[in-house]
Image: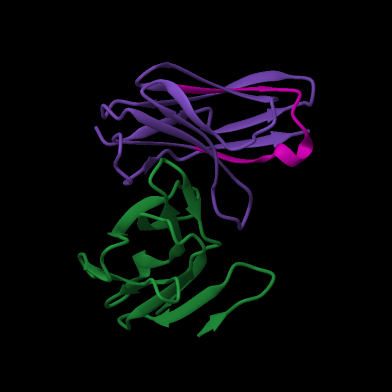
Amino acid sequence: GESVGLHLPTLSVQEGDNSIINCAYSNSASDYFIWYKQESGKGPQFIIDIRSNMDKRQGQRVTVLLNKTVKHLSLQIAATQPGDSAVYFCAEKDYGQNFVFGPGTRLSVLP
Amino acid sequence: DTEVTQTPKHLVMGMTNKKSLKCEQHMGHRAMYWYKQKAKKPPELMFVYSYEKLSINESVPSRFSPECPNSSLLNLHLHALQPEDSALYLCASSQQGVHEQYFGPGTRLTVT
């Protein structure tokens, strides 16, 4: 399940299940939306992106969905593995070089 | 080589010290970025260099001074910092006009 509070929101899933991480964005003028994975002690790592004129994009085991009507972005991870445990950030980019990151969600994969 | 390197990994400095953080990439990227990340928070953009010219400065205090000596190097000069500046400082690079950023591992800065 998912918990939100004073700490980073956490999503706990069983190994092998699918994960869905959600993100709300604020800027209607954002051109690209990007998902990053940040493991402990490391910098963020690019996972997948989607342009504002698309509503779905698939990668290897990951799918990003974009709903511009409600300004919502989601990242779906299929067959979640222990190595997927990390903090996931969505980010939005405008037509310049300005990247704004969302608050992040910690994904915890249970054995 | 798809790596962004940052030195030092850790830095402890007093409020009267002057220090510098260094970032290097050899991917031919012409956009380089500095971010600040506090614990359990997302990275916050501080500076963007595009073709070695400062293009975005997100209202960062003047005690942080960026420098881009060439297309592979990015420095962040620190002077008279405050304890609340303690954070992880991340460097990233990307192809110009491309949004896939490559991040370094960061420098963990503690201001005493």
Q: In the image, residue B76 lies at what x, y percent? A: 56, 24
- Residue A48, relative to residue B101: is it above or below? below
* Chain identifier matching the green colour in the rendered picture: A
Q: In the image, residue A4 lies at what x, y percent? A: 61, 77
**In what quadrant of the picture does the N terminus of chain B appear?**
top left
Q: Residue at x 32, y 61 (%)?
A: A52
Q: Is residue B66 left or right of residue A45?
A: right
Q: Is residue B10 left or right of residue B72?
A: right
Please give the count of numbered marks on the rendered protein.
Answer: 0
Toward the viewer: B30 or A15?
B30
**In what quadrant of the picture does the C terminus of chain B appear?**
top right
- Residue B107, relative to residue A48: is it above or below? above
Q: In the image, residue B48 lies at what x, y percent? A: 47, 33
- Among the 4 quarters of the image, the one containing residue B24: top left
Toward the viewer: B14 or A58?
A58
Q: Residue at x 44, y 56 (%)?
A: A91
- Residue B69, relative to residue A61: is it above or below? above
Which region is colored magenta? B74-90
| Colour approach in the figure | by chain
Q: In the image, residue B18 lies at what x, y percent? A: 69, 18
Q: Residue at x 36, y 66 (%)?
A: A84
- Among the 4 quarters of the image, the one containing residue A37: bottom left
Residue B77: within the magenta? yes
* Chain identifier matching the purple colour in the rendered picture: B
Q: Residue at x 50, y 52 (%)?
A: A100
